[in-house]
Image (cartoon, rainbow, N blue to C red):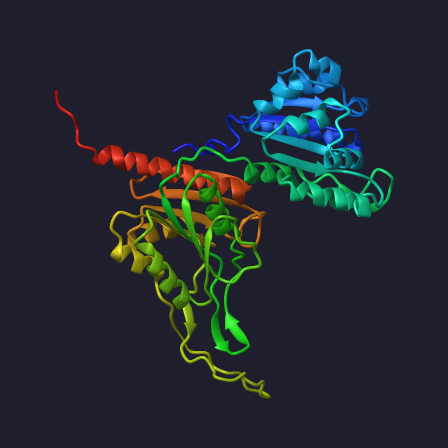
């Protein structure tokens, strides 16, 4: 199949992009281009101060839509009402300290701040400011107020600022801002009615009470899949090994430690699931005889560690499956496609996600990943390096299409 990515979760979204008077206003041009490239329809609203840094014409040409700059100009067409009413989200990037203050107290003295009072759609704010402004108690109070009301505030980053200072105040990276938007705006509920069971993270196999065998998995891919499935309407259970991640909201989380624990948890929830996605990096081997006490370091001697196979969870689930769609992952360092194809057949999977964990910019611990999705039908999809949140949606889109194809293939034909 084609190597092009599946439709972006932003495709078809209607976004209001607010631009305020920050030196970082020029970066909003790049944000706009990324949004339109992803298929979103963008209406730009600029404060008067923002027009001193970038001309409205720039945004108008790139968005293909008129730019709103003045409250009285907008009032003639009631844009302070119509734009937010028809929007899926309002994204303000960059947002100044002045804008944060006005938004927090409900001051409406320009078209953008007035729009916030009429809007009922999600609000994402990406601040940018110089000096020590971001850490000032007043600014932090305003940010806390906005977050308490449900706004998503994307913290600025540390780095050199326009004044020459090095501090927290730089506008967050474009990918971080778009990721926050994807996480906030509900996509099509194409998984409504599905029960999705996802595994994530590593397992830890005890050597003694203070040591264990594990791997480099961060759990980010599995967590992204669980959150994406929930946002697309599924009822989601996440079985997770030890990670430093915050569980996705609205997801049933089952924490486990060992491969045996994960096998038991997956088995307990398997019968109720309609889609099972095994993204966890489960240990292949475990110590056969874990020590009851800490193994002491002895001069000139090293302990011998005898290993035994850990439970093969995918094989166990495949053997008891009924109607579940079963998806596995293959994290490889060489001969990627051959190893993945072998695993797809050996485990009796419907789909397998193969990724090279040694690739630059991707793999374990990274926020990005690239993958090849193989199907038991022989089809193949290649996903180039992208955010794991985006890849999660791409994979789910492919699973939805696989289900539709299966239903069409098994549906009785009509005659007459």
Residue 398, percent across and down? 39, 38
Instruction: Establish if 63 lies above or below 120.
Output: above
Instruction: Establish if 147 lies above or below 41.
Output: below
Quadrant location of the C terminus?
A: top left
Nearer to us in this view, 62 or 72: 72
Q: Residue at x 40, y 35 (%)?
A: 190
Residue 384, percent across and down? 50, 39
Quadrant location of the N terminus?
A: top left
**Residue 312 seen anywhere in this rendered image of the structure:** yes
Instruction: Establish if 186 lies above or below 75.
Output: below
Q: Residue at x 38, y 48 (%)?
A: 196
Decide if residue 359 is on the left or right side of residue 283: right
To which quarter of the image does residue 120 belong?
Answer: top right
Nearer to us in this view, 173 or 379: 173
Residue 186, percent across and down? 51, 35
**Residue 29 seen anywhere in this rendered image of the structure:** no
Farthest top residue in view: 76
Residue 191, percent across and down? 39, 39
Q: Residue at x 32, y 52 (%)?
A: 272
Nearer to us in this view, 301 or 223: 223
Farthest bottom residue in view: 299
């Amino acid at each position: 199949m084609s190597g092009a990515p599946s439709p972006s979760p932003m495709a078809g979204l209607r976004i209001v992009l607010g631009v305020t008077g920050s030196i970082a206003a020029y970066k909003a041009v790049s944000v706009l281009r990324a949004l339109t490239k992803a298929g979103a329809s963008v209406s730009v609203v600029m404060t008067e101060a923002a027009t001193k840094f970038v001309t409205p014409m720039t945004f108008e040409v790139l968005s293909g839509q008129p730019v709103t700059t003045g409250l009285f100009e907008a009032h003639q067409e009631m844009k302070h009402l119509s734009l937010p009413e028809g929007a899926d989200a309002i994204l303000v990037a960059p947002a100044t300290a002045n804008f944060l203050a006005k938004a927090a107290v409900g001051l409406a003295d320009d078209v953008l701040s007035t729009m916030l009072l009429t809007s009922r759609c999600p609000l994402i704010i990406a601040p940018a400011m110089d000096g020590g402004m971001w850490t000032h108690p007043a600014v932090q109070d305003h940010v806390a107020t906005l977050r308490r009301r449900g706004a998503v505030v994307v913290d600025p980053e540390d780095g050199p600022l326009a004044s020459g200072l090095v501090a927290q105040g730089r506008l967050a990276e474009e990918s971080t801002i778009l990721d926050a938007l994807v996480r906030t705006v509900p996509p099509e509920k194409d998984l409504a009615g599905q029960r999705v069971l996802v595994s994530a993270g590593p397992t830890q196999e005890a050597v003694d009470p203070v040591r264990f065998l594990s791997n480099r998995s961060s759990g980010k891919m599995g967590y992204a899949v669980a959150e994406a499935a929930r946002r697309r309407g599924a009822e989601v259970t996440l079985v997770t090994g030890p990670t430093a991640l915050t569980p996705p909201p609205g997801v049933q989380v089952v924490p486990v430690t060992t491969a045996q624990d994960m096998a038991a948890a997956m088995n307990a929830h398997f019968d109720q699931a309609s889609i099972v996605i095994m993204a966890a990096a489960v240990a292949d081997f475990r110590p056969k005889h874990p020590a009851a006490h800490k193994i002491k370091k002895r001069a000139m001697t090293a302990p011998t560690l005898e290993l035994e196979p850990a439970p093969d969870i995918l094989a166990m689930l495949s053997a008891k499956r009924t109607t579940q769609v079963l998806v596995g992952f293959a994290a490889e360092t060489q001969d990627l496609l051959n190893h993945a194809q072998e695993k797809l057949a050996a485990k009796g999977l419907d789909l397998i996600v193969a990724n090279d964990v040694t690739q630059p910019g991707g793999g374990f611990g990274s926020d990005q990943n690239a993958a090849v999705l193989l199907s038991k039908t022989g089809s193949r999809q290649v996903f180039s390096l992208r955010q794991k949140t985006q890849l999660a949606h791409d994979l789910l889109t492919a699973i939805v299409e696989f289900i539709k194809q299966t239903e069409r293939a098994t549906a009785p034909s009509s005659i007459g």
